[in-house]
Image: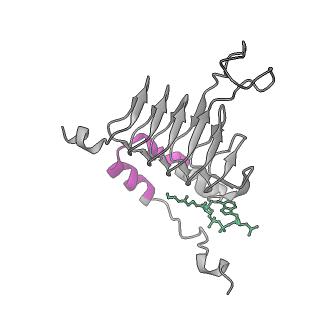
Amino acid sequence: MLHALRQPIYSLRNCTVSWSSRVERGVVLVNSTVGAYTYVAAGVFLNRTHVGNYCSIASGSKIGGMEHPWRSGSTSTRLSRHRIAETETLIEDDVWIGSNVVLRQGVHIGRGAVLGAGSVVLDNVPAYTIVAGVPAKSIRKRFSEEIIQQVTNTRFWKYPPDKAKQLLDSINFQSVPVRQISTRIKL
Ligand SMILES: CC(C)(COP(=O)(O)OP(=O)(O)OC[C@H]1O[C@@H](n2cnc3c(N)ncnc32)[C@H](O)[C@@H]1OP(=O)(O)O)[C@@H](O)C(=O)NCCC(=O)NCCS
């Protein structure tokens, strides 16, 4: 019953959503799956997309939207004999997708990647890579290769939050540089 109350109104067509995930109001999910402990914010659209565990998808993002047959006489599916592409989009565990991202159908986002707000992501994104822009380009890796390896070795995304936190606490993230956001604003 509690779970039912935590899941507000969203639209599902042929989907599986883990009970431990939270899907906000106005989300549309079509032929998609959402893994455990994942957050899907208001107004997100997912089509033929598989989302892993511990992902965060910010509001307004449109993921795996259908590619219409623009090579034929009309882009309208009412007029074309060509079928709409049915390729699947894959988002691995612990991916953070910023607000209003457009992620092209068929793209594969590696574990731990970050997609910057407003990005249009046309290509696969390797694990632990931050991409942003239109079209999205790599900004940097989240961590050094050594820390990526340590995080990967924990396989924390396979566990519930208490155990996952415990595994991540065993890693020293002090060497990851913290940039001051205020330095970008020049008055
Ligand atoms: C992608 C993101 C995580 C990067 O953060 P960061 O590592 O602190 O990035 P920086 O501010 O150091 O920017 C690095 C470069 O990427 C560019 N950049 C950062 N975010 C960008 C974005 N969303 N779109 C386009 N370019 C972006 C910056 O302009 C900068 O370019 P420069 O080196 O030419 O000046 C962050 O900008 C972002 O988009 N966060 C999402 C916020 C959001 O949507 N929240 C929703 C609620 S969860």
- Above/below status of 39 relative to 107: below
**Of 183 and 155, which appears nearest the observer?**
183
- Above/below status of 163 relative to 85: below
Residue drawn 32% across the image and 36% down it: 19
Quadrant in the picture for the C terminus: bottom right
- Above/below status of 39 relative to 87: below
Q: Is residue 169 left or right of residue 49?
A: left
Residue drawn 60% across the image and 34% down it: 64
Residue drawn 45% across the image and 56% down it: 168
Q: Residue furthest top?
A: 81
Task: Please state the extent of the stretch shown in magenta in the rendering.
Answer: 152-168
The quarter of the picture where residue 21 lies is top left
Whether residue 180 is visible, yes or no, is no
Q: Position of residue 104 (x, y in %)?
A: 67, 37
Q: Position of residue 152 (x, y in %)?
A: 55, 47
Q: Is residue 58 left or right of residue 17?
A: right
Q: Residue furthest bottom?
A: 187
